[in-house]
């Protein structure tokens, strides 16, 4: 259960990024790729910060 609570926020970020990029991609394909890249970078940064906090707290 402890692992699940760590995975859920990251999964929500990835799903949200995918949904947003897909929606923008339906409007303009180039914009969808740009938005997807930005959201993946932000998601990676958030995941890295969370892992560093978990290591510091452990």
Image: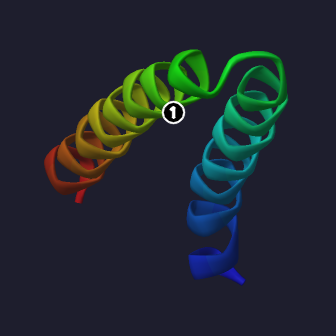
Q: Nearer the viewer, residue 46 or 17?
A: 17
Determine the image quadrant of residue 44: top left
Residue 51 vertical position relative to residue 5 in the rendered view, above or below? above
Q: In this view, does 31 lie above or below 46?
A: above
* Mark 1 secondary-structure assignment: helix
Looking at the rendered image, the quarter that the N terminus falls into is: bottom right
Say which residue label 1 marks: 36
How many residues crowd mark 1 within 10 Å: few (<14), some (14–19), many (20+)? many
Residue at 43 percent of width and 21 percent of height: 34
Q: Choose between 4 and 13: the one closer to the eye.
A: 13
Q: Is residue 8 left or right of residue 19?
A: left
Q: Quadrant of residue 27?
A: top right
Q: What percent of the width, then of the height, locates residue 24?
A: 75, 21
Residue appearing at x 56%, y 15% in the figure: 31
Identify which residue, 57 or 28, lies in the foreground.
Answer: 28
Quarter containing the C terminus? bottom left
In this view, the residue in front, 42 or 31, is 31
Report whether 50 appears left or right of 8.
Answer: left
From the top left corner, tell me how far across and down residue 2 is, in percent.
62, 77
Q: How is the image coloured?
A: rainbow
- Give percent across and percent down for residue 10: 57, 52
Q: Is residue 29 left or right of residue 45?
A: right
Q: Position of residue 32 (x, y in %)?
A: 60, 26
For the point 26% across and 40% down, which residue is it? 53
**Residue 4 placement: quadrant:** bottom right
């Amino acid at each position: 259960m402890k692992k699940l609570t760590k995975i859920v926020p990251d999964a929500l970020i990835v799903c949200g990024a995918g949904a947003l990029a897909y929606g923008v991609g339906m409007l303009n394909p180039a914009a969808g790729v740009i938005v997807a890249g930005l959201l993946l970078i932000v998601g990676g940064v958030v995941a890295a910060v969370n892992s560093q906090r978990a290591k510091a707290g452990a």
